[in-house]
């Protein structure tokens, strides 16, 4: 490097350091120190009840900015200290020694994470692939099923694009037909939802793909019943679990689906760029992999691992999936689901009581919904309200457009009942 090049390089370094020093001033209330030691959560026996004081301890496990009310779990969640610290520890280990010898430990950590994940979702370890997110899992199935002219795929029109538009793209290439199912707005029963899919099935249907819970309406489909119907007719089922993995207690063997996908960065509160793909053992040979790389022969012998032959991974993120399962197990997956439903139900009920004219895309019946709540403000543009909630009141949610225009709130275990009250009071004041 010549003298001019060295000087330019040094100016860039100094400029970068200066910018880094300036950035924190934009955030007067910085997150808590990642190296902090939050109060230890008590070990609870099955069936033990918990109160608000317990949930306050759970909130303390997260490094949320003071004053921020975070209700966007349907999109992106913070990770608790135990998971963040695991990622940092594993990353530092690689950065300090990237040798094959040091990194060999990640093989065992990945295996432990796979076994923990399998138990967590009610599956066999050889049915679990640790992917990068729900999108990758969905596209693995979309591109891996052998389909062609004359075949039909039934999908929900409320699916995420990775389980919706992706089918259209492949259909354009291979000539099969995509059938979109619409369900009644704010349905009154599982029967309404079930019949919409049942009526769309024909003798040419080869696959059925649907979201367990819609990210745009909050409607929950009767997954087990739909999977049973499909199994009876030899139809492959793909369940997009982006809004239920980490939120609801899962038993995929009981659900009966052929494939299930989920992301770590949403309700699972795990490491970023990690996820799961479950493929029922008997169906693994039926799906072609999207990626083939080093170690393919070994992966091919290990069930669903053939779908994670992705080359160099972020070993820290993959390994920390096991730490995230441990965090959920400390609380209890049933308690996590109970808390999420409690908060979501409180939002729906309180908004109904306090905001005249408000309406919901999400059913009030908890059997037809989960943690996602989407409402239409009576006297304000949803996008404007979404922005005002954050800019003026430190409330982070999401805005929906199109047929499901509204504001989406998705609370999690790091949310409190006091925060629910605060959100409802603000929405009521702006209505």
Image (cartoon, grey):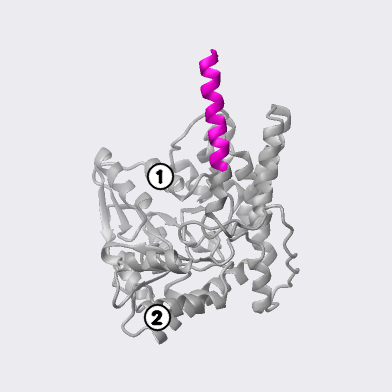
Secondary structure at badge 2 equals: helix
* Quadrant in the picture for the N terminus: top right
Secondary structure at badge 1 equals: helix
* Mark 1 crowdedness (10 Å alpha carbons): few <14, some 14-19, many ≥20: some
**Percent coordinates x, y for residue 412 in the rendering:** 54, 67
Q: Is residue 384 visible?
A: yes
- Point out which mark residue 35 bears: none
Question: Is residue 9 shown in magenta?
Answer: yes
**Percent coordinates x, y for residue 398 in the rendering:** 40, 63
Q: Image quarter for residue 80?
A: bottom right
The span from disc 1 to disc 2 (Cα, nearest Å) is 41 Å
- Point out which mark residue 139 bears: 1
Q: Earlier in the sequence, mark 1 or mark 2?
A: 1
Give the residues drawn in magenta, as a range: 1-20
Q: Is residue 122 visible?
A: no
Q: Nearer the viewer, residue 184 or 62?
A: 62
| Residue occupied by mark 2 | 428
| Residue sitting at x 51%, y 51% | 280
Whether tag 1 and tag 2 are in contact, CB under 8 A, the answer is no
* Quadrant in the picture for the C terminus: bottom left
Left/right placement of residue 274 relative to residue 287 reads right
Question: Is residue 161 shown in magenta?
Answer: no
**Percent coordinates x, y for residue 346 in the rendering:** 49, 80
**Percent coordinates x, y for residue 55 in the rendering:** 64, 72
Position of residue 97 relative to residue 209, above or below, is: above
Left/right placement of residue 84 relative to residue 399 reads right
Q: Nearer the viewer, residue 40 or 387?
A: 387
Q: Considering the whole magenta stretch, tell me its main secondary structure.
A: helix
* Mark 2 crowdedness (10 Å alpha carbons): few <14, some 14-19, many ≥20: some
| Residue sitting at x 32%, y 43% | 147
Q: Nearer the viewer, residue 265 or 110?
A: 265
| Residue sitting at x 72%, y 56% | 36
């Amino acid at each position: 490097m010549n003298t001019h090049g060295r000087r330019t390089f040094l100016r860039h370094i100094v400029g970068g350091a200066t910018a880094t020093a300036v950035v924190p001033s934009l955030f007067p209330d910085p997150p808590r120190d990642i190296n902090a030691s939050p109060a230890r959560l008590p070990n609870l026996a099955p069936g033990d009840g918990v109160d608000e004081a317990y949930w306050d301890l759970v909130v303390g496990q997260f490094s949320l900015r003071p004053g921020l009310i975070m209700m966007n779990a349907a999109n992106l969640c913070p990770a608790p200290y135990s998971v963040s610290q695991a990622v940092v520890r594993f990353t530092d280990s690689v950065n300090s020694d990237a040798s094959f010898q040091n990194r060999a430990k990640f093989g065992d950590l990945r295996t432990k994470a796979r076994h923990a994940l399998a138990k967590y979702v009610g599956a066999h370890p050889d049915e679990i692939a640790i992917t990068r997110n729900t999108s990758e899992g969905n596209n693995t199935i979309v591109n891996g099923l052998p389909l062609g002219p004359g075949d039909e795929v039934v999908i929900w029109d409320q699916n995420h694009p990775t389980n919706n538009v992706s089918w259209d793209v492949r259909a354009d290439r291979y000539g099969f037909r995509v059938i979109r199912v619409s369900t009644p707005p704010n349905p009154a029963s599982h029967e309404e939802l079930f019949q919409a899919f049942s009526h769309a099935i024909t003798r040419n249907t080869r696959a059925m793909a649907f979201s367990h819970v819609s990210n745009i309406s909050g409607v929950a489909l009767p997954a087990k019943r739909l999977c049973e119907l499909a199994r009876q007719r030899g139809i492959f089922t793909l369940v997009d679990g982006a809004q239920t993995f980490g939120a609801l207690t899962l038993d995929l063997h009981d659900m009966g689906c052929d494939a299930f996908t989920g992301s770590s960065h949403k309700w699972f509160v795990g490491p970023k760029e990690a996820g799961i793909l479950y493929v029922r053992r008997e169906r693994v040979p039926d799906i072609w992999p999207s990626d083939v790389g080093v170690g393919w022969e070994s992966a091919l012998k290990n069930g669903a691992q053939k779908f994670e032959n992705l080359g160099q991974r972020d070993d820290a993120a993959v390994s920390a999936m096991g730490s995230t399962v441990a965090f959920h197990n400390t609380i209890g997956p049933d308690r996590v689901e109970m808390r999420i439903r409690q908060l979501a139900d409180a939002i729906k009920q309180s908004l109904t009581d306090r905001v005249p004219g408000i309406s919901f895309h999400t059913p009030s019946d908890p059997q037809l919904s989960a943690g996602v709540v989407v409402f239409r403000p009576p006297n304000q543009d949803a996008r404007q309200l979404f922005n005002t909630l954050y800019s003026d009141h430190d409330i982070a949610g999401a805005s929906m457009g199109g047929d499901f225009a509204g504001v989406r709130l998705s609370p999690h275990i790091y949310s409190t009942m006091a925060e629910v009250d605060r959100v409802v009071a603000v929405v009521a004041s702006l209505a």
